[in-house]
Image: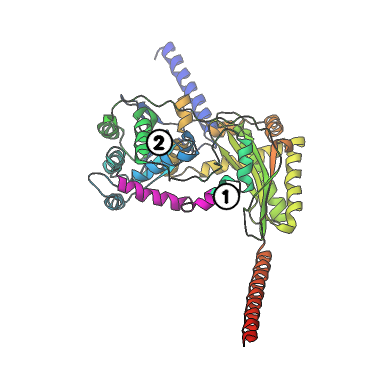
Amino acid sequence: MSVSALLLLCKCLLAAVIFASQAVSASQYSPPGLYDIDHLTLDNGLDVIFKQRPGAYTLSVRLWVGVGMQDFECEHQETPHFLEHLLFTGTSQYSEAELEHLVADHGGSWNAYTGNEETVYEMDIYSRYPDLAINTLYEILTDSTISEENVETSRDIIHREVGGKPSEVRRWFRLRGFGVNGTEKAVLKLLPGVDYVCEGLRTADHITRQDILETYDRYYVPENMALIVVGDFEHAPMLELIKQTFGQIPLTPSPRRELPEPGIPQDYEGETGTLSPLLSNDAVIGILYGIPGFWSEDIFPLMIIQHYLDFRISEEIRINRGLSYSPGVWRETLSKFGLFSIYADVDLDDIDEAMDIIKSEVIKLVDESMDDELLEKSKMKILLQNVQGYESNSQFADYYASDYVYFKEKGYFEDIEAKIEAVTSDDIARVAREYLSLEKGIVIYETPTLTTTQFYILMTVLVVLILSFALYLYLKAHSRVRKQK
């Protein structure tokens, strides 16, 4: 071997060692292979994401569609949900029941959900039946029977899912603020101009078959969809199968989506519910904040803050003092805005004490931030949970579907673990001051209109009054009869 060849071999070996050490470091907390995917775009614009994971005889397929409730104003927000239901009601070849049996008989299960900004169709099946998984999803997408009869049947199902068909009386009260809880009122303040919470009741009453068909034609186009395949499959046959099915959908211009962005809140005064809850023996209290959407780098410090405060609130309010059964921290993040809530369910006598604890923990975080040791512990909890959270093909597929918007924009999936590891105590301090100061949150007291005891006392008083009035009428009538005699 020549000297130059030997030097080249040494360089290659050195590069391989460096790459291997970097890979070990990068994957220490990242689920192995999570960010290593195959991506291609079909001629009609459909994105396809492959992740081969042999070793388990399962195949998970997700069909992502870029349409959700936030694409519509309140009166029509259930339209994409409506459409999602209708795509499961049968095709020209199979009834809904036949489709259910077809999938189940091959060891599969399927479902779908409509979120705020996306709709996702799910199929998990025994890996020997990839044709059935792809063909079935393709068939419901392109050949579902959206008949007037199915529309009305699905309308009833949607009403049951959202708590029943709202009566005109309930709508009248809702539009005037009655039956609206404190959290909903706070959201309306924090997100002006956005229909995240509707002042009226969200209903499917006004949605027509034509509305549904127009939504399908506009949003269910290849450039606005992605097919995600994870599990035990062969790359070339799977790609050919997809080209023969989804690849045959005509190229259609993708819709221009203008998702709402909230204005600047003008009022941070506290909120209570109005006749909501109507009857209870306890209350829900907390503080609600507006935070940025998932495009902001501040989301990663907020993830750590969420876990930290969730532990601190639970430790102080539940474990140390026994004031609450399920206190915690809730975070919702959409593309252009988010919400951050610290809450606790408490007895009516413990409201002030529990609220003082919540406020003191927030003040401590904002004023003192987190020391490096506590920050590393908080980060480690998230990182270790993430490793455990992606073990099955289904979990991998769900992750790709949930983060597909980021992938579509950036061309890769965000290494969340690396972002979390990179967060510093200075980041925590800055983000806490910017978003979680007490003056930037709305304090919420959701106390009942009546306690159970008050309700029983009121009912007892009403019964006594009714009986007294009945007795009065009886005695008066009896007296009149005696005078007539």
Q: Nearer the viewer, residue 23 or 125?
A: 125
In the rendered image, the quadrant that contains the N terminus is top left
Does residue 227 appear in this view? no
The image position of residue 179, as x and y in percent, is 59, 51
Name the residue tied to disc 2.
64
Q: Nearer the viewer, residue 338 or 397?
A: 338
Q: Determine if the magenta segment contains residue 161.
A: yes
In the rendered image, the quadrant that contains the C terminus is bottom right
Q: Determine if the magenta segment contains residue 238.
A: no
Lateral position of residue 104 relative to residue 176, left or right: left
The image position of residue 475, as x and y in percent, is 65, 81
Q: Residue at x 41, y 31 (%)?
A: 37
Looking at the rendering, which quadrant does residue 340 occupy?
A: top right
**How far separated are the C-alphas under marks 1 and 2?**
38 Å
Q: Nearer the viewer, residue 42 or 255?
A: 255
Magenta range: 147-171
